[in-house]
Image: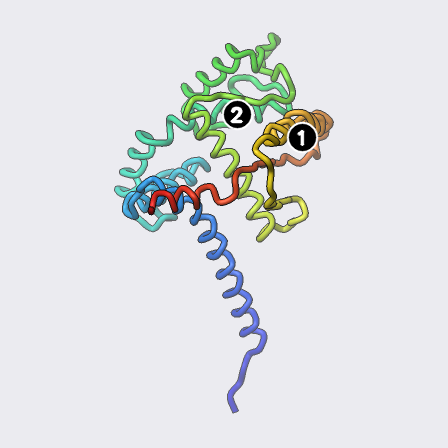
Amino acid sequence: MPHTDTQTEQDTSAQDASEELERRVVYAALVPAVRLGRLFGVQLKEAGEWLELAHLKDLVDDGVRLKEAAERLNVSVRKVSMLSSRLRENFFVPEQEHELPSRILFALWAEPLSRKRIKQYLSNLDEELIDGAIDQLERDGKVELTEGRTPTYAIIESAQRLVRRDMMARVDALNSMLATVTDAVYSRFFGPDSGSAFARSLQLRVRSRDLPKLRALYEEQIWPALAALDEDARDDPDALPLGVALSWAPLDAIKGALQRKDE
């Protein structure tokens, strides 16, 4: 009589279901990039190369050395070195230069820090880039240097919005928004405390002349409320750092652009 290990079968089935969900979520996250690539004529080969660069950038951002990155990506060190060169030339340094001010301000949110401590916080980044970002924030009046036994930098206002209109700044804002969305996706599907994340997708109709009311809703109500919550948490060591993404846009805007392109 054949013997069946029911518990083992159940465990295997649960693991298979978990892996399927992980892959479906990753696939779903890739579709928006593919649709944009199709709209702008990005070919499959080029998109594949960008995916390789994105994998490496994610590891480098976490301080992983190239040799270890090669092992994790299951490619040769030579391949990773080539990707690293391309990453620095095309994406890494330009994005860092505009991403850094936001990261430094976030580091200073809890307490003033010396230039040395800021560099320790961003230890995987080039020190010259960090110095340049600190100096720019000081020139822009976002931070001030407090003299003392150890000079430290402090945020002039506890809640700030870095509104910049040049291309790289807008890309930085996109990276920040997508990072928040990614955190929400992970937390809702896989996180140990899904209640700490919140995500809603709404579809509604709005008259063109009422669009300014949406912006006013953010500027006059949502932003002041969030800023007040941030200020209330300033001296609380148990405060939970959160990313918040609020957005609206014409429904299926990219779908319409693709349809017009294909006509």
- The image shows residue 186 at horizontal and vertical percentages of 55, 48
Q: Which mark is drawn over residue 102? A: 2
State how many labels appear.
Answer: 2
Q: Amino acid at mark 2?
A: Ser
**Residue plotted at (66% across, 44% down):** 196
**Residue plotted at (56% across, 69% down):** 11
Mark 1 or mark 2: which is in front? 1
Q: Which mark is drawn over residue 222? A: 1
SS for callout 1: helix
Name the N-terminal-most of marks 1 and 2. 2
Q: Residue furthest top?
A: 147
Q: Amino acid at mark 1?
A: Ile
**Residue plotted at (48% across, 33% down):** 174
> In this orientation, which residue lies closer to the viewer: 62 or 222?
222
Could you classify mark 2 by the number of other residues whose Cα lies within 10 Å: few (under 14), some (14-19), or many (20 or more)? Answer: some
In this rendering, the answer to whether 21 lies above or below 66 is below
In this rendering, the answer to whether 79 lies above or below 221 is below
**Residue plotted at (49% across, 27% down):** 122
Q: Is residue 154 left or right of residue 2?
A: right
Could you classify mark 1 by the number of other residues whose Cα lies within 10 Å: few (under 14), some (14-19), or many (20 or more)? Answer: few
> In this orientation, which residue lies closer to the viewer: 12 or 189?
189
SS for callout 2: helix
The residues bearing labels 1 and 2 have C-alpha atoms spaced at a distance of: 20 Å
- The image shows residue 172 at horizontal and vertical percentages of 46, 29
